[in-house]
Amino acid sequence: MMMKQPLALLATLLFLLQFGLSSCKPEEIPDDVAEEEPENEVAPLCSITLEGEKVTLLEIRGEASSLVIQVTANKEWTLSSNGSWCTPSHQSGMATTTGAPREVTLQLEANETDAVRSVQLILRADTASAVLEIWQKIYVDEAKWETATTAVVNMKVGWNLGNTLDSYGEWIELWTSNKPSDYETAWGNPITTRAMIARFREVGFNAIRVPVTWDQHIDADNNVEEAWMQRVEEVVGYVLDEGMYCILNVHHDTGTEGWLQADLSNYGSISMRYRKLWDQIANRFNKYDKHLIFESYNEMLDKQGRWTETNADGYKAQNALLQDFVEVVRGTGGNNRYRNLSINTYSAAHSPLTLNSFIVPDDVVEDRLIAQVHVYSPYDFALNENSPVKLFTSQGEQEISDIMERLDQRFITKGIPVIIGEFGAMDKDNMPERVKHAAYLVNEAAKYGIVCFHWMGLLDRNTLEWAEPELVEAIIGNAK
């Protein structure tokens, strides 16, 4: 009996061990009820395009308009605008398919405020987003203030009141009483009268450029003396009272002896003086209408006094000063917010490098900038007093034609009108050739809608009789 008990106990343990092991074996799950793997979640995507290209920033004109954009999103989307003047035709939609974005029309109201404004359009699709920022320039009814393009169309041909208010020299300070009239007559011309201006209007000129040198009339604090400002305003008034366009500028402050240089190393001090000068001019002449045009500067040179072309830093400084000019004038408000402005190239030149290096300034209002160059070509015939060349040849014609073509490609085809602020040919006792030259240049310019301003001459300002009637006839007869 005592031997049977251990055997019975051992059998019981073996049974329990076998049962326990079998009960701990993992349960097999049938294939048909196996857990399914989750599908890959598609990341949300969205974009805004314009004419097939992704776009994040747009600058538009100031008038009321509509603009069609495209939205693409792989989820349901919403489109919001944070400006009441920009309303999208659709503000939400279902997911778009690849290659078939949803077109949305933006209705844009005219910007009749006195400042550039912006709006943000935000496209959202789940957690994805895309932003389009639109900047709108100021709108001005052209019936109130004409564009630069219209102004140049309305001009026919112009003349320069040169060697007058642009005269300067230390000897004037030393040997005269320093009255405005002393400077005005210093280079041999008489006091300007309205009768002089009227003579040009009577034969068909309808624009006068009034060059002014300011340097000797500015004090240590860069304030323009009142007597000088008054005389400049009086002469400008003669032109405007004759119903003509008047271009007022900063003249021999530039050039080989001027302080206004394309000098990047001294840009800060030059800019400060330049901005203060234009602030005073712009405020003084703000009340005058669209017939008054401000010109940035005459023929700006770099510190080395290089003509025609400069280096990269020179162009950078010149372009920065142009931007200063536009900003200061616009900042004075009133009529100057819309006034047409003439912006000159480096040294008023037209070489390929100078034209390609020219940056049109940013402006708050559309189509109010006029590009200006000067054309004394061909040089040996027109301007080189040491050259024996007296004939205007077919080579000279080609040179002028090439200049006009470059101006057209750089400016006119891009919506920027052009004037030739100075042209002419020195007297080498060759009047028939000078007549041919003037006729060809003015006619060739007219083909592109370019307006030409002859440099001085033409009229005997003392007698008010025409000193060069042949040239007058050639210029007027070939103007656009």
Image (spheres, helix red, strand yellow):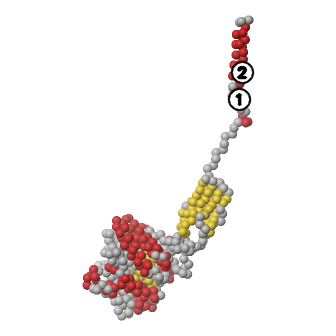
How far separated are the C-alphas under marks 1 and 2?
A: 15 Å
- Amino acid type at mark 1: Glu
On the rendered image, what quadrant is the N terminus found in? top right
- Label disc, if present, on residue 19 of the rendered structure: 2
Quarter where residue 307 is shown: bottom left
Residue at the extreme front: 2
Residue 323 x %, y %: 43, 70
State the residue in front, 117 or 244.
117
Q: In the structure shown, which secondary structural element does the residue marked by tag 2 occupy?
A: helix
The residue where tag 1 is placed is 27
Eye-nearest disc, 1 or 2: 2
Earlier in the chain: of badge 1 and badge 2, it is: 2
State the residue in front, 394 or 410.
410
Residue 53 seen in this snapshot: no
Q: Is residue 122 above or below residue 245?
A: above
| Count of numbered circles in the view | 2
In the picture provided, is 277 more to the left or to the right than 131? left
Q: Is residue 251 above or below residue 352?
A: below
In the picture provided, is 6 more to the left or to the right than 340? right
Quarter where residue 17 is shown: top right
Quarter where residue 397 is shown: bottom left
